[in-house]
Image: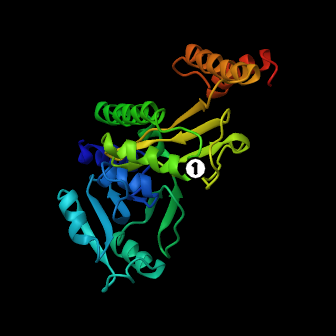
Amino acid sequence: MNIPARWKLIAKRIREVGADAYLVKNPSNVRYLHCPTIPQDMLTALVVFRNARAVGIVSALESHRARDVNPDMEYHVIGNLPGVSTSSKNLKQGIKAVLEGADTVLTDSVERIRGVKFKKDSHLDKIRQSKEAEEIRYIKRACAITDKAAEGLVEFLRPGVTEMEVAEEIDRLMMANGAQGTAFSTIVAFGKNSGYPHHYPTKKKLRARDVVVCDFGAMYNGYCADMTRSYFIGTPTRKMKDVYEAVRESQAAGIKSAKLDMPTKAIDKACRDVIKEYGFG
């Protein structure tokens, strides 16, 4: 990925609005402009200037690794000792030092420093909405890894296993297939628990004819997948089949309706209309 090219896009925005710099504090945005292929960036904040010069604000503890992953960036180290360098006081002092001489600064967050006028700006979010070819490859790979885990899980699902054991197996399968980590905490829900969208896995045991809902995703080179899959243990009831078919057709309708520049609420409506037709709306 051409990270300096991203700095140039930010610098262009800075010049367009007549500002002096852009302060980035949102962790995902910091990672996007420093080293997007790692799960969690070591920088505390990052500043891009009008000339596309970028300075990372980093703790003493993480400074060597930060330079290793991106030697093209300048760094301002905050704190004298590891462990105290992430305090808000040290961070504010670091930001102030890096922004010395700047009058107007765009930012993706909230910041207050005497003598500096900060303006909240969402342009970086808009830039990130358009994915580069390499980003798309990473997302597809994350999805493929997640899909393999979903397929491999079938053999593991049997009466007696717990939600926690299934969640552990899903994570193991993703890592075994090349995941860098998980995109979020894996959700596994049996029976009644499957009605809770964000259930946390417990020691509840799987029983025959339970419905199993799993929500999980792999992280690959810093990019994530998110997949939900439902499994039936034994022979599903008529109602179970009807609900499953309603959701399957709803998803297909949403995919078919999706067009460029289409409001997401219109796609949502296409999905919900199918569910209503089945009488579940």
Residue at image coords 72%, 16%: 274
Figure quadrant of residue 194: top right
Position above or below: 54 against 174: below
**Is residue 239 shown left or right of residue 51?**
right
Q: Position of residue 163 (x, y in %)?
A: 58, 49
Residue 130 is at least partly visible in this image: no
Residue 74: x and y in percent read 22, 64
Taking 88 as reference, is 240 above or below it? above
Query: Which structural element holds mark 1?
Result: loop
Q: Position of residue 219 (x, y in %)?
A: 39, 45
Image check: 275 left or right of 9?
right
Can residue 188 be seen at all in this image of the molecule?
yes
Residue at the (41%, 80%) spot, across then down: 90
- Count of numbered badges drawn on the protein: 1
The quadrant holding residue 59 is bottom left
Q: Residue at x 23, y 66 (%)?
A: 65
* Residue 256 in picture, x, y percent from top left: 56, 13
Amino acid carrying label 1: it is Thr
